[in-house]
Amino acid sequence: MFEVTDGLLVVVFLILLYILNHFKGIISQLEDRLNDSINSIEKNDFEMPSLNALKDEVLEIVESTIENLQPPTALDHIAGAVSQYFQFKLMRDMKLDEMAPVLPEVIETAKEVIDGIKN
C-alpha cells in the first residue's frame, strides 16, 4: 500500500516546503531592510539651495579674489621677460618654427583619427 517511492516523494515534498519557507524568511528580512532604508531616506531633510544663495556665494568668491589681487611688481615684469626669452630659445633649439608648414598635415591626420573613432 505505502511504497518506497511514495515515501521518497513525501520526503522531497517536505524538503521543498522547508526550502520555500526559508526563502520566505529571507525575502521578509530583505523587505524589512528595504523599508528601513526607504524610511531613513524619507527622514533626510535635505534642502536644495536656492539660486540666489548660490549666486551670492559665487559673488563672494569673486569679490574676495578681486580684493586679494595685487598689481604686478617690477620683479614680475622682469620674470616675464626672462621667461619669454627662454621660451623663444627653447623653440629655436627644438626647431618648432619649422613645424608651421607641417601643421596642416598634422591637423588632417588628427581629423581622420577622430573620424575613425566616431565611426
Image: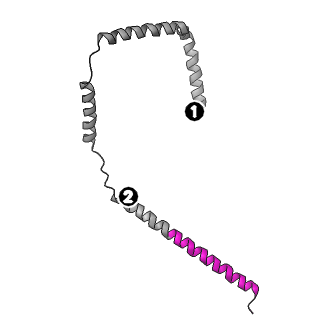
Q: Main secondary structure of the magenta part?
A: helix
Pick whichever, 75 or 8, lies toward us.
75
Q: Residue 37: where, in percent of width, then height?
A: 42, 61
Colouring style:
one colour
Q: Answer with left or right where residue 67 lies relative to residue 107.
A: left
| Residue at 57% from the left image edge and 28% from the top image edge | 114
Residue drawn 56% across the image and 71% down it: 23
> Residue at the location (45% across, 67% down)?
32
6 w.r.t. 59: above or below: below
Magenta segment includes 23? yes
Quarter-of-image position of residue 2: bottom right
Does residue 69 appear to the left or right of 104 in the view shown?
A: left
Q: Quadrant of residue 83?
A: top left
Q: Which mark is residue 118?
A: 1
Depth order, front residue of 108/38: 38
Considering depth in this image, is 54 or 37 the residue closer to the camera?
37
Type of amino acid at the residue the image marks with label 1 = Lys
Question: Residue 79 shows which numbered tag?
Answer: none
User: Is 2 colored magenta in this rendering?
Assistant: yes
Between marks 1 and 2, how big is the CA–CA gap? 41 Å
Q: Residue furthest front?
A: 75
Residue 52 vertical position relative to residue 69 in the rendered view, above or below: below
Q: Which residues are magenta?
A: 1-27
Q: Quadrant of the C terminus?
A: top right
| Pointer 1 with pointer 2, Cβ within 8 A | no
Few, some or many C-alpha atoms within 10 Å of disc 2 (few <14, some 14-19, many ≥20)? few
Q: Closer to us: mark 1 or mark 2?
A: 2
**Residue at 52%, 6% in the rendered image:** 92
Mark count: 2
Q: Residue 41 bears which disc, if any?
A: 2
Residue 14: percent from the left, percent from the top? 64, 80
